[in-house]
Amino acid sequence: MDTLADAMPPPLDPSGRSFALLDEAERDRLSPLLRPLPWIDGLITAMVIAPATPGEADGAEDGLDWLYMIWREGREAEVGALSLSGSAEIVDPVMAHYVHVADTLFEDPEAYRPYLAGSSDPAEAASLWAAGFWSGLSVSPDAWGATLEDEDALPLLAAVLSLVREADMPESVRADSPFQSMPAERREQMRGAAVEMLPEIILALHDHSLGLGEGADEA
């Protein structure tokens, strides 16, 4: 295969199996080629709760522009060499987790929890998660535009951004980070609070996105 896109089969796995249900052998099989699972969970969450934009496609398979981002940097050759069945073995758990996150947020939102496992340092896992979430925002800038300018939503997004350590922060975000001049102790306190409140923050952003979608439908 010549490109990363060639290694990504489009069918959406309907099983809804969470990353939390992967066993150690499965994690070991995925980790060489995929970004850290908390990062991917953050990315998926951003895609699931993104505000609807007028005229966008309804089909799930039409909204997989983010899949190319799941691959670990520097592994282009290995990913490009995957067979179709080999790529499916790697991508299928990601798609199953996508279904899990979407089902939870739309059908049982109070049960939603971000996936922050796989690291001995919760702050590191939260930073990876938030970096993935912010990368997800870059996939749909038009969809997120109104939210980024909304006074009610900005504090929620700022709380998510506060979780991202400088090393994990996308270059485009790092340059304009509002936390560059914040004292380290205050930043750590904000991070700790944001980790505890992350499920509530995401549900609030989801509600905000749903409200924007209803407004677009009425217009």
Image: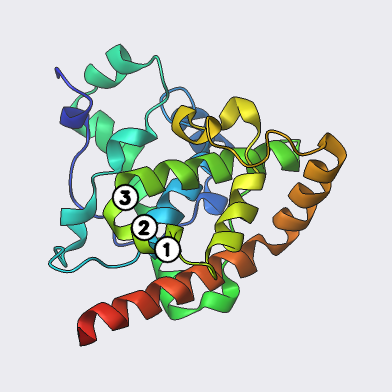
Question: Could you tell whether 72 is left or right of 186 in the image?
Answer: left
**How many C-alpha atoms fall within 10 Å of the one at disc 2: few (<14), some, or many (≥20)?**
many
> Where residue 218 sits: x, y (%)?
22, 87
The Cα atoms of the two marked residues, 3 and 2, are separated by 5 Å
The Cα atoms of the two marked residues, 1 and 3, are separated by 10 Å
Quadrant of residue 184 within the rendered picture: top right
Q: Are marks 2 and 1 in contact (CB under 8 Å)?
A: yes
For residue 147, the mark is: 1
For residue 141, the mark is: 3
Please identify the quadrant where the C terminus is shown: bottom left
Whether residue 23 is visible here, answered yes or no, is no
Q: Are marks 3 and 2 in contact (CB under 8 Å)?
A: yes
Q: Is residue 213 above or below residue 88?
A: below
Dot 1 amino acid type: Thr
**How many C-alpha atoms fall within 10 Å of the one at disc 1: few (<14), some, or many (≥20)?**
many
The Cα atoms of the two marked residues, 2 and 1, are separated by 5 Å
Q: Secondary structure at mark 1?
A: helix
At x 24% / y 49%, what residue is drawn? 64
Whether residue 52 is visible here, answered yes or no, is yes
For residue 144, the mark is: 2
